[in-house]
Image (cartoon, coloured by chain):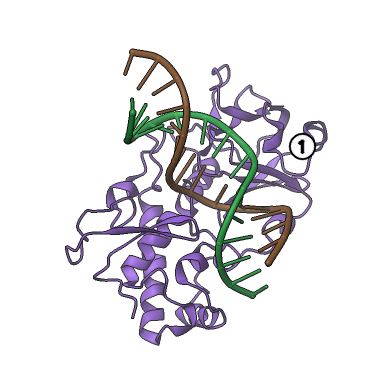
Chain colours: A purple, B green, C brown
DNA sequence: AGCGTCACCCGGACGC
DNA sequence: TGCGTCCGGGTGACGC
């Protein structure tokens, strides 16, 4: 279930290195690519992909929304982790996992491996990252993203809050978990129409989104991955996956409903629909 | 523009 | 125990 916090964590580890993941990938040159699941590659055949990535050097690692970007000598490699995806740096000679579907080989025998059990992830190799991330909404954690800006964006739409928060062209990086957690923090009902919020409510939503995401980043995400991350956020869910359990704020029992085909968790007491 | 629906996947949970 | 079925995550394509 990688959302913004997880991608941020992985980007940081690939950039700076870590004990668990091995060293940084910065400055390394890709000398080969093993592709075991061609559909992982968006728009390119494995042959074309391999030809274009060979000899390229990784000059930077960034995150934008739920995409992880590797700036190459020419062009950009973008990875979307889907829900079960993970990127790991292997040691020379280290055996590959059955779910390592795409592997990038470095000169020294180590590899950058895209592990994706459920095969929802995608890999893009493009001349300009805008081809992939061009339509994403603003970064909710960026300093320039203000409550005023959010208020204007909400007022310009007439959608239910929950589906709107999940819309990556509205806001980048928020997925199902953090949408529910943000709305609970803001005490707003998931079905509330976006253009009916008061200034005070906009301000609560702004803080709710930012607080939930920041907390996730600090705790290394919400993924249930006991080998690599064991993201601490899962232990702090206030509503997500807590149907029938007490709301930490008021004690009422958390309810679950379907909104746009997505499981949606909320407190019927704190998050009233007027 | 917005909404609903479906397909893509598979590990794990559930029911019988 | 073994089998079948359903679920959930994010996105993109589709039709209305």
Q: Is residue A247 above or below residue A198?
A: above
The residue nearer to you, when weighing A1 against A18, is A1
The residue nearer to you, when weighing A258 against A113, is A258
Q: Quadrant of the C terminus of chain A?
A: bottom left
- Indicate the chain on which mark 1 is placed: A
Q: Residue at x 41, y 43 (%)?
A: A223
Is residue A153 found left or right of A243 in the rendered image? right
Q: Residue at x 19, y 57 (%)?
A: A246
Where residue A44 sits, quadrant-wise, is top right
Residue occupying the far left of the picture:
A251
Is residue A47 found left or right of A169 in the rendered image? right
**Secondary structure beneath disc 1?**
helix
**x%, y% of residue A115?**
55, 32
**x%, y% of residue A170?**
57, 69
Name the residue tied to disc 1. A53
**x%, y% of residue A67?**
59, 51
**x%, y% of residue A81?**
56, 43
Mark 1 Cα-neighbour bin, 10 Å: few <14, some 14–19, many ≥20: many
């Amino acid at each position: 279930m990688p959302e913004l916090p997880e991608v941020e964590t992985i980007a940081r580890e690939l950039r700076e290195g870590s004990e668990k993941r091995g060293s940084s990938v910065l400055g390394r040159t890709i000398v080969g690519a093993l592709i075991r699941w061609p559909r992982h590659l968006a728009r390119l055949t494995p042959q074309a992909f391999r030809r274009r990535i060979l000899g390229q050097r990784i000059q930077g690692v960034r995150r934008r929304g739920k995409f992880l970007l590797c700036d190459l000598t020419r062009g950009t490699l973008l990875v979307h982790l889907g829900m079960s995806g993970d990127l790991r740096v292997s040691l020379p000679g280290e055996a590959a996992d059955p779910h390592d579907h795409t592997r990038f080989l470095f000169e020294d025998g180590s590899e950058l491996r895209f592990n994706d059990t459920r095969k929802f992830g995608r890999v893009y190799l493009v001349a300009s990252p805008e081809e992939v991330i061009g339509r994403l909404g603003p970064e909710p954690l960026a300093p320039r993203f203000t409550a005023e800006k959010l208020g204007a964006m909400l007022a310009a739409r007439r959608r239910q809050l929950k589906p709107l928060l999940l819309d990556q062209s509205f806001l980048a990086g928020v997925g199902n978990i953090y949408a529910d957690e943000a709305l609970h923090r803001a005490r707003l009902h998931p079905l509330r129409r976006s253009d009916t919020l008061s200034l005070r409510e906009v301000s609560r939503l702004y803080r709710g989104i930012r607080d939930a995401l920041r907390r996730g980043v600090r705790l290394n995400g919400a993924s249930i991955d006991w080998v690599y991350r064991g993201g601490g956020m899962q232990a702090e869910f206030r509503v997500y996956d807590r149907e029938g359990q007490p709301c930490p704020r008021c004690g009422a029992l958390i309810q679950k409903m379907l909104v746009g085909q997505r499981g949606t968790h909320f407190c019927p007491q704190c998050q009233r629909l007027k």
